[in-house]
Amino acid sequence: MNCFICNQAADLYCTVGDKEISQCKNCGLGITGDLFSQVGDYHRDETYINEPELFKNIFQKRVKIISDFKKSGKVLEIGCSIGVMLQLLQDRGFTVYGVEMSAGAAKIAAGKGLKVIVDKFENIKFKDNFDIIILNHTLEHLENPRRIIKKCFSLLNKGGIIYIDVPNFGSWSARKQGYRWSLLLPEEHLWHFTYFSLEILLREFKFKIIYSERASGIFDLDNPFKELIFALIHFKKRFFSELVTLFPSLIISKLNLGTDLMIIAQK
C-alpha cells in the first residue's frame, strides 16, 4: 500500500482488533486498512447536546484563533454537526453556512437559525466563495482528502483561510501508546494525520501554513481552569483524569506534542 499524499510505501504500524493500520515511511500518514468498507456512523451529536459547556469551551478557543486572522466574512464548516462552532462565529458577526451528512444534526442546527445543507460536500455546487472554510475533526473521516482540499482551495477567496483540526498521529501519546492510543478509532478514522503529512498535502495546492498548534488535555480548551471547576462542581468523572494529567498535559502542549493538531493555512 502506498501513501496517497507522497506516494511512498506504507508499512504495517499496528493492528486494532481486526483492523490494520499502516504508516507512510516518509510523511508519517496513518492509513486504515480495507478502506471504506468498515467505516460506520461516526456522528456523535448527542455528545454536543449532553456537554454544552465543555464544547463551548473547546470551540471558543478555536473561534478566537480564527478571528485573529479573519475579523469578518463568509464561513463554511464542513461537518458542522449541530452548529456549535458556527453559532459562536455568527455571534461574532460572521456570515455562516454549514454542510452536514446527519439530517438530525442539521435539523438542530437549523433550529438555531443556521443555514445547513444536508449532503456530501463533494456533491454540492456552491454559488459563492468563502473567506473561511472549517474542517474540524472531519478530514480523517472523508474518503478522498486530496479532493476535499482541492475543492476548498477553489472555493476560498484570495487571502482566505482553511482551518483544519485532526487527531495528531505524531503526538507523544500516539507514539507512546501505539495500538492502545484512544484516538486511533479505525472504525471511524480512515486517515491518521501528522503535521508533516498535512503540510505536504496543503503545499500541493499552494496553501501556506500561517498557524499551527498541538495541544493536549484541558490545555486544548479556551479556559482550562473553568473546565476543572465545572467538572468538580458537577461531579464529572473526567475531573480526576484532568487533574492527574494537568502537569503532563501542560508540558506536552508546550513542546507541541499534544494529541490535537490544529492548522490554519492561507490561499
Image (spheres, grey):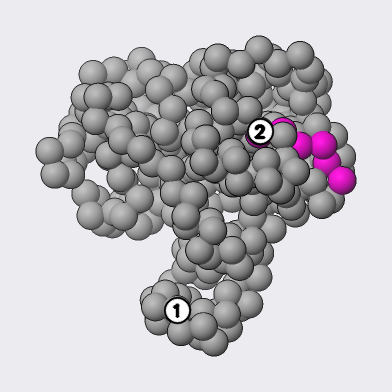
Rendered position, 239 above or below 154: below
Q: Residues within 10 Å of mark 2 (few under 14, many from 20)?
A: many
Measured Cα–Cα span from mark 1 to mark 2: 32 Å
**Residue 94 drawn at (x, y percent):** 83, 41
Residue 14 position in % (x across, y down): 18, 41
Give the prevailing secondary structure in the magenta stretch: strand
State whether residue 9 appears in this view. Answer: no
Taking the magenta stretch, the answer to whether it contains residue 40 is no
Residue labelled with disc 2: 116
Residue that badge 1 annotates: 236
Question: Which one is nearer the viewer's eye here, 138 or 259?
Answer: 138
Q: From the viewer's perspective, is 59 left or right of 200? A: right
Disc 2 residue type (three-letter)? Val
Indicate the secondary structure of the residue bearing disc 1.
Answer: loop
Q: Which residues fall within the magenta stretch?
A: 93-98
Q: Residue placed at 66% from the left, 19% from the top?
A: 153
**Residue at horizontal 40 percent and vertical 45 percent from the top:** 170
Q: Dividing the image into 4 quarters, which one contains the N terminus?
A: top left
Quarter of image, res 244: bottom left
Q: Could you say where residue 132 lies in the image, as x and y percent from the top left?
A: 74, 33
